[in-house]
Image: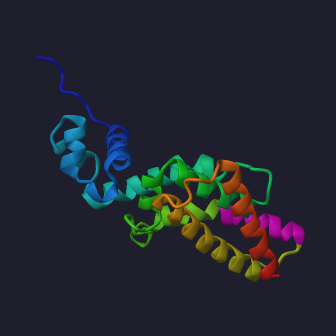
Amino acid sequence: MPPKPKFSKEMILKAALKLIEEQGYSSLSVHKIAEEMKCSTQPIYSNFKSFQKLKEQIALEIYNDSKDFIEKDYGYSTICNFAIGYTLTTRNNPRMFRALSGTEIKLSEYPEAAANMYLDVWEKMKKEAEIEGVDLDKLSKLFFHVLVYIQGFSHEIVRGVMDVLSEEEIIVAVRSAVELLTKILE
């Protein structure tokens, strides 16, 4: 008798992410993941104590998959690089944006994923601010305003309103907005 196939956490997460890319986060279920993996739900529940724990890990995976793009150096300040990377990540993977933006995954339900999402960027911004002598209160306000801007801009990208913009035009638009917000909040 051949050994039973083993299903790792990584295999389960990969199947879940594939389903999210194809069908969206709201369609995700343990049964659909099992169907995608051609197995019963038992291996999923063996690896994750609950569907909630699985979804928490999915939120972390989505962030980690986006991290390289979000943290890429486009040659600007940390906050500008973050805003550009976030927006371009949205353009390249709108279903993941929907999941991350809170329309499908409520980050408040996954505090570890929410903290990870912005903590690295915030820490880099604080270091830059200390070097440049920028007040942390002003920096915090700037970060908040930039988040609001990129969420709105990214939402319009997902809706297809910004399809006519090239990557370079998106970079210019985001960079200009960050520069304007920086001047307004000085």
Residue ID at (71%, 50%): 168
Residue drawn at 79 percent across, 60 percent down: 77
Residue that appears at 45% across and 50% down: 61
Q: Tell me where residue 5 appears, x and y as whole percent.
A: 22, 28
> Residue 82: where, in percent of width, then height?
67, 59
Colour scheme employed for the rendering of this structure? rainbow
Does the magenta stretch mainly form a helix, a strand or a loop? helix
Q: Is residue 151 above or below residue 120?
A: below
Image quarter of the C terminus: bottom right
The N terminus lies in quadrant: top left
Residue 38 quadrant: top left
Left or right: where 107 falls relative to 179: left
In front here: 119 or 26? 26
Residue extending farthest top: 1
Q: Residue furthest front?
A: 164
Going by the image, does 95 lie left or right of 156? Answer: left
Residue 74 showing in the rendered view: yes
Residue 67 % position (x, y): 58, 50
In this rendering, position of residue 151 left or right of residue 106: right
Measuring from the top left, give residue 65's x and y in whole percent: 51, 47
Residue 139 or residue 6, whichever sits in front: 139
Query: In this rendering, would 29 be left or right of 132?
Result: left
- Does residue 124 appear in the picture of this structure? no
How many dots with numbers? 0
Magenta stretch: give its range: 121-132
Q: Is residue 50 above or below residue 141?
A: above
The answer to whether residue 125 is magenta is yes
Residue at 24% across, 39% down: 36
